[in-house]
Amino acid sequence: MFSALRHIFRAAPGESVLLLGLLALGGLVPVAVLGLTRLLVDNLAATLGSGAFTPALLWPLAGLALAFSLDFFLTPWVAYLQGSVNEKLTARVHVLLMEKVGRTPDLTPFEDPSFHDTLQVLRDQAPYQPLNLLVFLGNAFRGGLTVAGVLFLLFTLAPFFPLLLLLATLPQALLTFRLQKGVWEALLFGAPEARRMRYFAEVLLTPEAAKEVRLFGLLPFFRGRYLEAFQSLYQTLRRARTRQALGASLLVLLSALFTALALFLGLRQALLGAGGLGSLVLLLQSVGSLQQNLYGLVQDAGMLYESLLYFERLEGFLAAPSAVEEKASARPVAPFTEIRFEGVGFCYPDGRRALEGLSFALRKGERLALVGENGAGKTTLVKLLLRFYDPTEGRILVDGVDLRELDLKAWRACIAAVFQDFGRYALTLKENILLSDPAGPHDPARLEEAARAGGAWELVETLGWEALLSRSFGGTELSLGQWQRVALARAFFRRAELLVLDEPTASLDPKEEAHLYRRFAELTRGKTMLLITHRLGSVQMADRILVLHQGRLVEEGTHEALLGWGGIYAELWRSQAGLYQPG
Ligand SMILES: Nc1ncnc2c1ncn2[C@@H]1O[C@H](COP(=O)(O)OP(=O)(O)OP(=O)(O)O)[C@@H](O)[C@H]1O
């Protein structure tokens, strides 16, 4: 509760306080109406037949008129403030999620299905759970004040009235609380299905798979998968909701019984002549008002509970520790002379082994190529070097210091990379390049140098720096090879000591690829480079080649030495060279 309130106040401090004030005022209006009605009726009974409008009648009447108009006046302003606080609160929740996920230094959470599930639920419900919290918290607060005020008025008639009416509603309140929890848990429990539903819908609704969907006629397949997941989630939710509705209906009987008893006792008291006429009117009105307000309160409290659970879940998610620890006393990073892998092994969180007993050194200024079949562990090695994961065995030393001891941000600042699945951002061409160093400086000469290095200068000349690279936002769409040039330019724009290129030319045409590799010596002057590629023609320019096979380092040497060795590299080379031989 406290954490949810903290979020509300942090999101919109002034508006939340104002909202609370208006709600309190709104909560007291029905109590004032009841009290004034009683006064009016009692005073009317005393002056009945005189025909005179005495101040004793006019004051309560004016009070009533004021109370009714206050109620009308408050409604739009409460809605205004609720809307405004909700927008700010929703944005705050999204920013907190983005910050948490964006600041997590490693990729481990993405391996965990429960991380995706929780994130999905938190994102899906972000547009309405904060609003629910506000509305139901507001209603519960206002309803609570009304109920307390009415109970107090009833208490002045006889102490057993409030007691009976509480008995009529309390069990229902408790049951609603318990069952609401069931619905929420079912929703969370059902989250993997919800995530699958979203995925199957996205396959059909987004452009990524649009070509295959049409060519292979995949609509029935993915629609079917979507409906299967929906049925499974729906059954779980329906069971929980049925239990809730049945339980609440049964308790209505109990509630009716106690209310009837209270009414009977009230009438009996009036018949026996205890209290004035105003007291009888107060009792009759209070029963209706209490019924309505208490039932509303119970409903609101149940919904409020669900929202509070949402915020509890959000807090847990935000507080979850990361697998890659950033040391408070991290060592600063100086330009390195050697990176050494020492008996490095790695298993992914699902237990899959990707690397084993890997030992080698990468020296400053060296151009090292990594080759190996699909799944040999090349990309995993890069992920460890960038500390997206920590090795599960052995260590990586930078000039003798364990990578885990180094300041992570400063370490990453030394590295530029083109990943296999490089980013394609719906931003301008210029922004797509300068993203590798968003803090700048972004002088035109530096940008041009990077664009030329990556082979993207032609694009700049044709489209212009400010061209928006996204069809869905009304801009231009690039071909995959053009996107790869932009990704290369981005990597070259970063002032980095170490350049990591994972299949950097996979989508380039042969002319551009050859052009790039011919200029490599110039482009990587003064830098250390790690190149992963299946195109063995291009690794000849590397100073040294490492061959990985099933996660192990099996061969190491220059192109000529490895060819002479006659091992896996020579075999890969021969099979690739064979593709270009006639016959
Ligand atoms: N996130 C992951 N979770 C579990 N296993 C993974 C994950 N990523 C990769 N692997 C497994 O680790 C092994 C090494 O994968 P890696 O991506 O490093 O290979 P690679 O040599 O880069 O392959 P390719 O040439 O196809 O890019 C593979 O068996 C792969 O299935």
Image (cartoon, grey):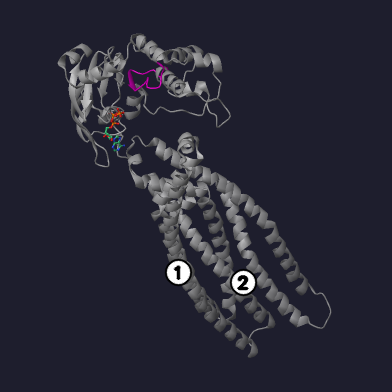
Mark 1 or 2: the one toward you: 1
Q: Earlier in the sequence, mark 1 or mark 2?
A: 1
Q: Are marks 1 and 2 in contact (CB under 8 Å)?
A: no
Amino acid type, callout 1: Leu
What residue is at 42 percent from the left and 16 percent from the top? 454
| Horizontal and vertical percent position of residue 478 | 50, 23
* Range covered by the magenta-colored residues: 493-509
The quarter of the rendering in which ligand 1 is drawn is: top left
Q: Residues within 10 Å of mark 1 (few under 14, many from 20)?
A: some
Amino acid type, callout 2: Ser
* Above or below: residue 44 compared with residue 19: below
* Left or right position of 476 against 374: right
- Can you identify the residue that label 1 sits on? 175
What residue is at 53 percent from the left and 24 percent from the top? 428
Q: Based on the displayed image, in which of its 4 quarters is residue 534 positioned?
A: top left
- Can you identify the residue that label 2 sits on? 289
* Above or below: residue 270 compared with residue 425: below
Q: Based on the displayed image, in which of its 4 quarters is residue 145 positioned?
A: bottom right
Q: Is mark 1 within 8 Å of ligand 1?
A: no
Foreground pick, 97 / 502 = 502
Residue 11 in view in this figure: no
Dot 2 falls on a residue whose secondary structure is: helix
